[in-house]
């Protein structure tokens, strides 16, 4: 669904208003960056989830489906469909785990490896461009603040 995000007109405590405004700005920035990167990926005919799986396999090696799901933050049902689509494209393959015949291992094919080797630097460059308005110090601060909020309970 579409979420309209505007500065808050909520009349609460200053802390509540400040928190809502920070939250709105964080969500807006995140959605904007994500949308722009997704548009660039769609030019390569790849989804964010597909890229996440290829990137994880490329940097971490073979994984089972559950591990991949945890790495790219997607639900089990969706991850199956994403992997099925990557198999259709010839980028990944499923193999039985020799140590555990119930487990299936996902690995890159030569074609998948070729694609991610070519596309990862392009994607990284797009990300660097998205954050080019920030200084190195601001990037460090942003990373630290996001980690702090992300770990809060």
Image (cartoon, rainbow, N blue to C red):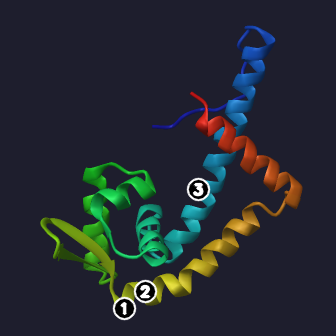
Q: In which quarter of the image is residue 63?
A: bottom left
Q: Which of marks 2 and 3 is nearer the N terminus?
A: 3
- Residue 86's place in the image compared with 135, above or below, is below
The answer to whether mark 3 and mark 1 are in CB contact below 8 A is no
Of residues 66 and 110, which is closer to you in this image?
66
Marks 1/2: CA–CA distance:
5 Å
Where residue 116 sits in the image (x, y, percent)?
A: 49, 81
Residue 106 quadrant: bottom left
The image shows residue 41 at horizontal and vertical percentages of 53, 70
Q: Position of residue 121 (x, y in %)?
A: 62, 80
Q: Residue 25 appears in which quarter of the rendering? A: top right
The count of marks equals: 3
- Marks 1 & 2, CB-CB < 8 Å contact: yes
Look at 25% across and 52% down and name the residue there. 77
Q: Looking at the image, is mark 2 or mark 3 nearer the viewer?
A: 2
Horizontally, residue 65 falls left or right of residue 130, namely: left
Work out how far the residue at label 2 is from the one at label 3, CA to CA, in angstroms. 25 Å
- On the image, numbered disc 2 is attached to which residue? 113
Q: Which of marks 3 and 1 is nearer the N terminus?
A: 3
Give the residue at x 17% y 72%: 99
The secondary structure type at the circle numbered 2 is helix
| Quarter of the image with the N terminus in it | top left
* Numbered circle sitting on residue 110: 1
Q: In front here: 81 or 103?
A: 103
Q: Where is residue 69 in the image (x, y as percent from the top left)?
A: 36, 56
Left or right of residue 147: residue 62: left
Task: Compute the Cα span from label 3 to label 1.
Answer: 29 Å
Residue at point 66%, 44% (across, down)? 147
Give the label on residue 35, or none.
Answer: 3
Q: Which mark is residue 118?
A: none
How dense is the environment of label 3, judged by Cα within 10 Å: few (below 14), some, or many (20 and up)?
A: few
């Amino acid at each position: 669904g579409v979420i309209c995000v505007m500065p808050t007109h909520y009349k609460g405590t200053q802390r509540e208003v400040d928190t809502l405004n920070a939250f709105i700005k964080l969500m807006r920035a995140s959605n904007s960056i994500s949308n722009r990167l997704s548009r660039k990926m769609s030019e390569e005919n790849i989804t964010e989830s597909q890229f996440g799986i290829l990137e994880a396999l490329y940097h971490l090696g073979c994984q089972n489906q559950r591990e991949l799901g945890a790495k790219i933050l997607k639900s089990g049902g969706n991850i199956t469909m994403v992997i099925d689509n990557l198999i259709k494209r010839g980028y990944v393959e499923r193999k039985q785990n020799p140590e555990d015949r119930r487990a299936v291992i996902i690995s890159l094919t030569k074609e998948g490896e070729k694609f991610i080797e070519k596309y990862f630097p392009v994607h990284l460059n797009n990300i660097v461009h998205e954050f080019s308005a920030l200084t190195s110090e601001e990037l460090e601060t942003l990373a630290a603040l996001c980690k702090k909020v992300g770990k809060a309970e």
